[in-house]
Amino acid sequence: MNEQHHNNAFTRLSNTSQQTTASGNINSRKSFNKIIDEQSSSYIKLTAKHLCLFGIFTIIAMILGILIVCFTSPKPKETCEFTFKRMMKSSIVSSSQPRSVAVGDFNNDHQMDIVVANSGTNTIGIFLSQGDETFTNQQIYSTGSDSRPYSLVVNDFNNDNYLDIAVANYGTNNIGIFLGNKNGIFTNQQVYSLNSSRPVFITIGDFNNDNQTDIVVAIRDTNTIGVLLGNGDGSFQDQITYSTGYDSFPCALVVGDFNKDNQ
């Protein structure tokens, strides 16, 4: 009976040991799985963090690289080149000695024509544009014997919407007006005396605010400028002179509102 009791106790002990061992194995497995899960979670978090940092670093590196290339790469040398076509020549008399030139559309064909003051032949010459970078032969208008035209200007002096020409005749102490029409043809010269003054330069402006074009000339030999007020019909009033000072010898003019008084 004692032996049986001993066997029963051994059996219970064995069962208890097995249960304890099994329970320990289960708990150990759970603990191991928990550790694995925690490590996996930490690894995933760490990997995501590294990937994020790597992405930011990559973007910064790319931006820095682009900036370095932009600011350190040699810039292409900028060049400015002008190309001119071969000069087109229009023949004039070799002795004409052209001293001044102006442009305007004299025949209303929307092409720029040319007028030249020929001091050597006492004429002005008109070259009408043919629209293909060439011009007609010179049309000659006399400025008078020994007139020696020095300077000219283009404007509509009689308000007919056709351009006219004013020329400063140095040799004959006057200005000449050529009134134009729509065909590029001009009237004979109308002369306005400057007395004993020899004009070397001519330009225009509205000096009395009457919306009519006036003329001013530089007179070198008398140290003056001369103003001729326009009447709006192609005619002009007598010269009004203004001194430029002793030995000033004026040879050019420019017109503008220098004191901003609209005059």
Image (tube, rainbow, N blue to C red):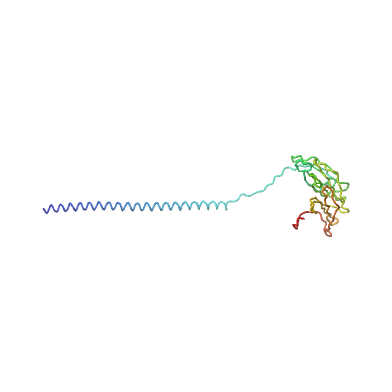
The one nearer the camera, 40 or 235, is 235
In the rendered image, residue 141, in percent from the top left (x then y), is placed at 84, 43
Q: Count the numbered circles shown.
A: 0
Looking at the image, the residue that sits furthest to the left is 1
In the rendered image, residue 221, in percent from the top left (x then y), is placed at 85, 55
Left or right, residue 56 beside residue 246 = left
Where is 11 relative to 86, above or below?
A: below
In the rendered image, residue 93, in percent from the top left (x then y), is placed at 83, 43
Left or right, residue 49 beside residue 233 = left
Where is 132 relative to 228, above or below?
A: above
The one nearer the camera, 118 or 74, is 118
The one nearer the camera, 233 or 25, is 233
Looking at the image, the residue that sits furthest to the bottom is 246
In the rendered image, residue 90, in percent from the top left (x then y), is placed at 79, 42
Left or right, residue 158 beside residue 27 = right
Where is 32 relative to 86, above or below?
A: below
The quadrant of the rendering that contains the C terminus is bottom right
